[in-house]
Image: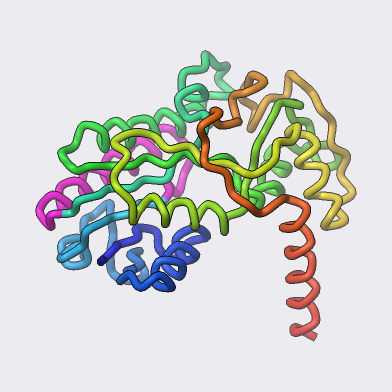
Amino acid sequence: MKIVVIGGTGLIGSKLVNKLREHGHEAVPASPNSGVNIVTSEGLAEVLKGASVVVDVSNSPSFEETAAMNFFNTATRNLIKYGQSAGVQHYVALSVVGTDRLAERRLSDAEKTIRGYFRAKLAQEKLIKESSIPFSIVHATQFFEFAKSIADASSDGTTIRVAPVLIQPMAAEDVAAAVGRIAVGSPANGIVEIGGPEQFRLDEFIRLGLSAHNDPRKVVGDPAAGYFGVEVDERTLVPGKDARLGEIRFETWLAQSARSTVGAADTSR
């Protein structure tokens, strides 16, 4: 079948396109670089022609609420409009485990930026649910690849403070594989949760990730620090019991990542 992947040149999208093609599907990556802009609708009618499935793994370029809300509302309305015209039979969107819980928090002014992003993601999901296109919304846990980004957002330069709550991160490779299986299956017409094969404390996850790359910063478990500054409960960041789990363990991914870094350094000499 023809499957259009919005954001098909990014971290998840590029892996997803490769996996779909390996299984014989016509996977078409769509992004501004390929002449498809989901905000302006440029190229959408052409790329969606004959598509059975559209998978949206794009993301807002900003976490700020107004910018994120404008992006997701405009892009999703355009995808629904042109998807309906093209006869798309399955709309798949990648979102985040805990989106509803994080969006509903009562926060201080300092925390409102990240909450605004999750409110925008909820708005995206609402539009998809209310459209006439059968859908699957995939809630994924945090990616292994973003351990450093979480650390940097929680660092004062030498010390990283994060809440010691549970997290069940997963490899981008597993995210792409799960989204691919969902895309070629029957629409769930609801939310499908995916996560990694093992749970960690958030501070432990960050500590292991930094240690593998010889990052000397100290990681402190601080309940008041939250997640990107947002207060979280013990299970805000983990999926429910029916989540579909990936296979790649963090230890395995770290070893592969370290080898890739060494290989890249060797070839640049």
Image quarter of residue 126: top left
Q: Position of residue 62 (x, y in %)?
A: 46, 44
In this rendering, is residue 48 above or below 199? below
Characterize the magenta stretch by its predominant secondary structure.
helix
Numbered marks: total: 0
Name the image quarter holding the N terminus: bottom left
Foreground residue, 114 or 47?
47
Residue found at the far left of this picture: 85
> At 48% from the left edge and 37% from the top edge, which residue is drawn?
193
Viewer-nearest residue: 160 or 266: 266
Quadrant position of residue 163: top right
Q: Is residue 78 above or below residue 13?
A: above
Residue at position x 82%, y 42% in the image: 207
Residue beneath the point at 73% across and 50% down? 250
Figure check: 106 above or below 23: above
Return the x and y of residue 34 as percentages of the image width and height: 33, 71
Name the image colouring. Answer: rainbow
* Residue 64 inside the magenta-drawn segment: yes
- Part of the protein shown in magenta: 59-87
Residue 205 at x, y = what percent? 76, 41
Measured from the top left, where is residue 269 in percent x and y?
Answer: 80, 86
Instruction: Farthest residue to the top: give it.
Output: 106
Left or right, 162 with respect to 230, comes to right
- Which residue is drawn at the image coordinates 75% and 83% (left, top)? 268
Q: Is residue 96 left or right of residue 135?
A: right
Residue 55 forms part of the magenta stretch? no
265 with respect to 198 (left or right) = right
